Image (cartoon, rainbow, N blue to C red):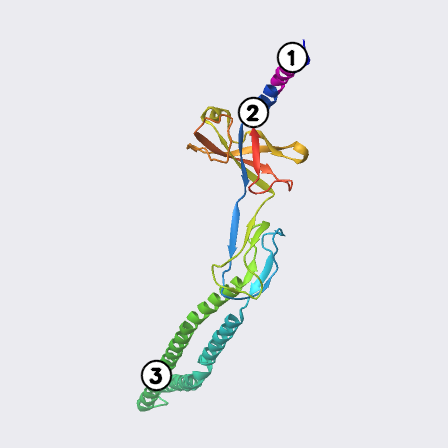
Amino acid sequence: MNYNNELKLFSGIMILGFLPVLFISCSGKAGAYDASGSFEAVETIISAEATGTIEAFIVEEGQTLKAGEEIGFIDSTQLALKKKQLEAQIRAMGSRLPDIAMQTGYYKQQLAAAQIRLDNLKREQSRIRNLVKADAATSKQLDDINAQVEESEKQLMVIKKQDAAQVSALATQSSGLRSDVQPLLAQIEQVNDQLGKCRIVNRTPGTVLTKYAEENEMATAGKPLYKIADLSTIILRAYITGDQLAKVKLNQKVNVMIDAARDSIKHYDGIVEWVSDKAEFTPKTIQTRDERANLVYAMKIRVVNDGALKIGMYGDVKL
């Protein structure tokens, strides 16, 4: 056997020996995962609630924020001045409120004097009545005192009516002024609400993904300021074929894998929290266990993030 024949025989043996290894490697890789997808998170865009110049905005991309943390404020000078104006109007209306006790004091004095006079006349009436019974006074004296008592009672009644009328008029005036104050108080509440919205307060905990505004820029109500997402846990949206659907249940624990350094694989524990009840066409960027599958079902797997998982990163799932 010549040299060329020996070389061909050796090459054939090497190829035959390598084919099983290649087949095992490829089949092992194909069976290493049951589904694949990409990571995502609930992203929230925080917008301005007031219009004005951004006086302070302490936010940087990648910064972790807590719920309720104040991170800046928008100029509120005009709102503060408007509030002062409304408060001044309320004080002015308050100064016009009538002092009912003072303005009806004259009638109270007249009532007291008339009551004393009536009491004295009634005592005199009683004395004269007793004298008439004892024939020590005439009937004319009794008639005169009776007339005086009746006249005094009428005067007392007139003063009481005048006093009541004055009190009613002043009360109506006070009620009208107080009713005029109510709209101003409502406007102050509105201004207070607008002043509160000038404070930029983070409402949801998470990591700042994108910053859209800077200090000294003009903000308008509804203008996006930054985008935030809670990355402490992250969602892997993966896709499974119809024959795999029966193997997946809610709250099922699965193995999530990502590519790590030096061709190694990093594993995470995941929990299935949602499975779609409708099929959809396989996304072009997603590989399934059966590449011939045209329709797949989406599912969401929640994974605790150690900081290595990023939005948009690909991951695989082993059921």
Residue 164's quadrant in the figure? bottom left
How far apart marks 2 and 3 lie (CA) works out to: 108 Å
- Marked residue nearer the N-terminal end (2 or 1): 1
Q: Are marks 2 and 3 in contact (CB under 8 Å)?
A: no
What amino acid is found at the position of numbered circle 3 in the picture?
Val
> Looking at the picture, how far across and down is residue 183, in whole percent?
42, 70
Q: Nearer the viewer, mark 2 or mark 3?
A: 2
How far apart marks 1 and 3 lie (CA) works out to: 144 Å
What amino acid is found at the position of numbered circle 2 in the picture?
Ala
Numbered disc 2: secondary structure = helix
Q: Is 230 rendered above or below residue 281?
A: below
> Looking at the picture, how far across and down is residue 271, in whole percent?
56, 33
Which disc, if any, is residue 158?
A: 3
Q: Where are the magenta residues, as a range?
A: 11-21
Residue 188 lies in the magenta-colored region: no
Which disc, if any, is residue 87?
A: none
- Marked residue nearer the N-terminal end (2 or 3): 2
Residue drawn at (61%, 34%) of the image: 258
Numbered disc 1: secondary structure = helix
- Marked residue nearer the N-terminal end (1 or 3): 1
Which disc, if any, is residue 5?
A: 1
Seen from the viewer's position, the closer of residues 261 and 72 is 261
Q: Is residue 40 left or right of residue 132?
A: right
Tell me the residue that label 2 is attached to: 30
> Looking at the picture, how far across and down is residue 102, in whole percent?
46, 83
